[in-house]
Image (cartoon, grey):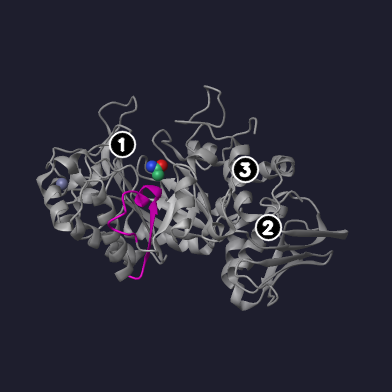
Amino acid sequence: MNIIPLPAAIEYHAGFFKSVGVPHIAGEERFAPEMRSFREQFAGEPVDTQTQIFCSTDASCAEREEYRLQIEPERITVSASCSDGLYHGLQTVRQLLLDGTALPCALIKDRPRFSWRGFMLDTARHFYTVPFIKKLLDSLSLHHINVFHWHLTDDQGWRLPVKAYPLLTEIGSRRLECRPVWGRYTGGFYSEEDIRSVLAFAASRHIEVVPEVDLPGHASAILASYPGLGCTGGPYRVEDRTGVFEDVLCAGTDAVFDLAAAVFDTITELFPSKYVHIGGDEVRFNRWEACPKCRQRLVATGLKSARELQSWMTVKLVEMLAQRGRTAIGWDEVLEDTEQFRLPHELIVMSWRGSEGGEQAARRGHKVIMAPSTKGSYLDYRHTEDPEEPGQLGITRVSQTYALDPCENMTTEAAAAVIGGQANLWSELIYAGKIAEYMIFPRICALAEAVWTERKDFTSFAERLPLHQSRLEKLHLVQYRGAL
Ligand code: ACM
Ligand code: ZN
C-alpha cells in the first residue's frame, strides 16, 4: 500500500475494497470535524454513495494519536479513542484513495513513536501567503506531521501585529528587495484575522501551531522599528542582507522587556498552543560588551561576562511566559554560559547545531526537540552536490533526513527527555512558495517517517516513495525527483 509514514502494523486479508469515486463518509457525531476535513480534502471529486468509510470510537486505542484502520470489501472503518488518532487514520485512507485503485483488504494498527513531529517555516526572510501556508499544512498532515513551528520574526522582517507596538509591522515588516529587482520593497505581515484563520485551519488538520519570536538576536526588524531598544541607538534597518548581525536587543534596557511582555500578551491572546519559541540563536555579544547600559546590568546581576547576559535574559523570558501559562522553547545556544543563571527546567531545548545541545539539555533535565542541521533536518540545504540545485550552506539528502534518529547515542534516561524531531526551512533564498515546496518534498516525507515509525527501513521507504510522490503530485506540490 506504500503508506508513508510506515504504519506500526499491517496485516493483509483476502479481497479488495472498490469504489467509483470517493466513498461516502459517516460515523459518530464526535468525529464530525474530522469527517468535514476529509470531505474538504476530496472536494470536487465524485462521491460513491454505495461505498462507505465509517468513523467510530475504539477505546482499545490507548494513546491519543493511535488509530485502527480496517479495510473490508463492504467498507472501510477508521477507529480511535481520540480525534487526533481518528484524523491520522483518515489521512492514511486519503493516501490510499489518492492512488485511485482498489484497496487491498487489511487491518492497520498504528501509532507514533514521538509526540512532536514538526516542521518550521521561516516566514521572516521571505513572506509567504496564508493560502500557501494552508496548502502546506494540509499536505504535512497527510504525513501525520503535527506541529507547525511558525518562525514569525527575524532580521529581515517582523510578521506579527502587536497593538502596543504598531511600528513592528509598519516599519519592521518591509525591507529592501536585494534580488535583481532593485529599489523595490518587499514584505508583509499577518493580520490577526490571517493568524486566526491559519490557526483554525491548522486545528482542522490536527496541527499545533507554535509561534516563534526570535529574541534577543536576529532583531534588526525590531531595532529598525524601535531604535531605543538597541545598545547604540542606531541607525538600524530591516536587513536586506543575509547573515548574522552584531546589533541585538540591549540587555541593559528595561524597555526591551516591556516589548517582550506586549508580544507575549499578543501571542497568549491569539495562539492556543502552550508552547512559545523564544529563539535565542546566534546572539553576538560585541555590542553588549561595549554598552554602558549592559555593563550596568552586569554589575547589578553580579555576572562577569557579557555572554552571561543571554542566560539572564532567557530566564526572564521563560518566567514571563510561565506567568502567562506558557512553556518556552529555545534554540540550543540558550544552554551556554548558564553557570550563574540556571535555566528553569521547564524550558524546552531545540537542538539545531548538531545533536550535542540536545544531549546536554537532556542530561540537564530539559525536554528536547531534535532538529540538527548536521543530521538531515535543514531543508534550506541543497538536495545534492549538483550546482543546479537551489539551496544554501550544505547538503541534506533525502536519505540523511530519513536517517535522523532523535535519540541516537543517548542513554535510555536521556532519550526519555526527547519529545521528537523536526525539519526546518529557512528562507533566505526561498522567495516563493513553489520553490519552498521543492525544498520540502520529499524530504519532509522522510522526516515524517523517521519520527513516526519504530520500523525504519530506508530500502522500503525508497520503494514506497515513487507511488507516494504521485499522490503529492495530485495535491499539486512541486517536488524534488532526483537521487535520494
Ligand atoms: C538557526 O538555524 N539559526 C536556528
Ligand atoms: Zn546594551
Relative depth, front residue between 199 and 321: 321
Q: Amino acid at mark 1?
A: Val
Q: Which residue is labeled 3 in the image? A: 403
Residue 244, label in figure = 1
Residue 49 in view, yes or no: yes
- Label 2: how many residues lie within 10 Å, few (<14), some (14-19) or many (20+)? many
Q: Amino acid at mark 2?
A: Thr
Residue 363 at x, y percent in the picture: 47, 57
Disc 3/disc 1 C-alpha distance (Å): 29 Å
- Left or right of residue 65, residue 382 in this image: left
- Label 3: how many residues lie within 10 Å, few (<14), some (14-19) or many (20+)? some
- Left or right of residue 279, residue 56 in this image: right
Quarter assignment of residue 138:
bottom right
Which one is closest to the eye, mark 2 or mark 1? 1
Q: Is residue 106 magenta?
A: no
- Left or right of residue 300, residue 283 in this image: right
Q: Which residue is farthest right?
A: 14
Q: Which residues are magenta?
A: 324-343
Residue 92, label in figure = 2
N-terminal of the pair, mark 2 or mark 3, is: 2
Who's the residue at 49% across and 47% down the image?
371
Q: Look at the numbered disc 1 and give the secondary structure of its residue.
A: loop
Who's the residue at 68% across and 45% down the image?
468
